[in-house]
Amino acid sequence: MKFGTLYSYWNKDWNCDYAGYAKLIKKVSEIGFDVLEISADHVYRMPAAELSHLNEFRKEYDITITTNSGPGKEHDLASVEERIRLRGIDYFEVIMEKMTLIESKALAGAIYSYWPCEFANIDKDGAWLRSIESLKSIAKTAERLGITIALEVLNRNESYILNTCEEAIDYCGRVSSQSVKILLDTYHMNIEEDCIPEAVRAAGPWLGHLHVGECNRRLPGMNNSIDWKGVASALHDINYDKSVVMEPFLLSGGSVGHSIRLWRDLSNNADEKKMDHYISDSLSFLRKTFL
């Protein structure tokens, strides 16, 4: 297993540019991480030259990059409007082509639709049919480039399409591509699954990516609201050897706080040095527990 964190842990806004990512690569390497998860939309918008430079930088610090997408409504692969679905297919194909410039092999997130969901039109059967056909299309590009698309299972407050591991297995089976897998997240599983370790075991070889965080989105080990030993046991049972990426959110305010619905500070007013200390302790906790 390789351990990483989402790039936004230290910030209140989703925005990040080349200089910001270069700083984060150095920081997470010094803390001891193997992986930095960055925004797919940033990859889409960054010039090829910057991505190539970023790749040299991440190799210097021995960091693997994974790519995370919470696509906007304008790229909804489940949209009833064909033009929006086609725009979404083109969007993800460009992202995957540009991911090769940073040697990123994992595209993770709620790629099957858009995030956060507005729940204005809830036609689950129709959304499945439309998004599965879209996924079949972009899966061909993923197969050609050696990229794994990991579809994130979200709780009922963020999506209606995939809420449980069981649903995700059914969905991925219908897509029927070796490049399309499942992303499970302990935060979302804590809300939707009867037993988190059993959901991990059920995923088995379908599990392509894992997000970890406490039930209130604090860092793993911060309050032990999750059965971490149980999760570790389940991961070993299925011989999971891919990325384990923290997705912590401690800072309220800004675009991150609004998207995550975090209305209070969970960091105890921590400065950057204290935030570094928190995440370093969490990484040590995960390595000890999972390995």
Image (spheres, rainbow, N blue to C red):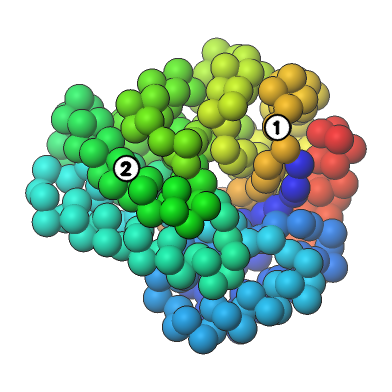
Position of residue 38 in the picture relative to residue 168 (left or right)? right
What residue is shown at x 36% (from left), y 48% (from top)?
A: 140
Residue topped by disc 1: 240
Type of amino acid at the residue the image marks with label 2: Leu
**Quarter of image, res 164:** top left
What residue is shown at x 26% (from left), y 56% (from top)?
A: 88
Question: Can you say whether 160 is above or below 40 in the image?
Answer: above
Provide the secondary structure element on which disc 2 rests: helix
Position of residue 259 in the picture relative to residue 3 (left or right)? left
- Of residue 166 and residue 9, the one placed in the foreground of this image is 166
Quarter of the N terminus within the rendering = top right
What residue is shown at x 11% (from left), y 56% (from top)?
A: 83
Quarter of the C terminus within the rendering = top right
What residue is shown at x 34% (from left), y 32% (from top)?
A: 175
Residue furthest to the front: 144
- Residue 246 in percent (x, y) is at 66, 47
* Residue 252 can be seen in this image: no
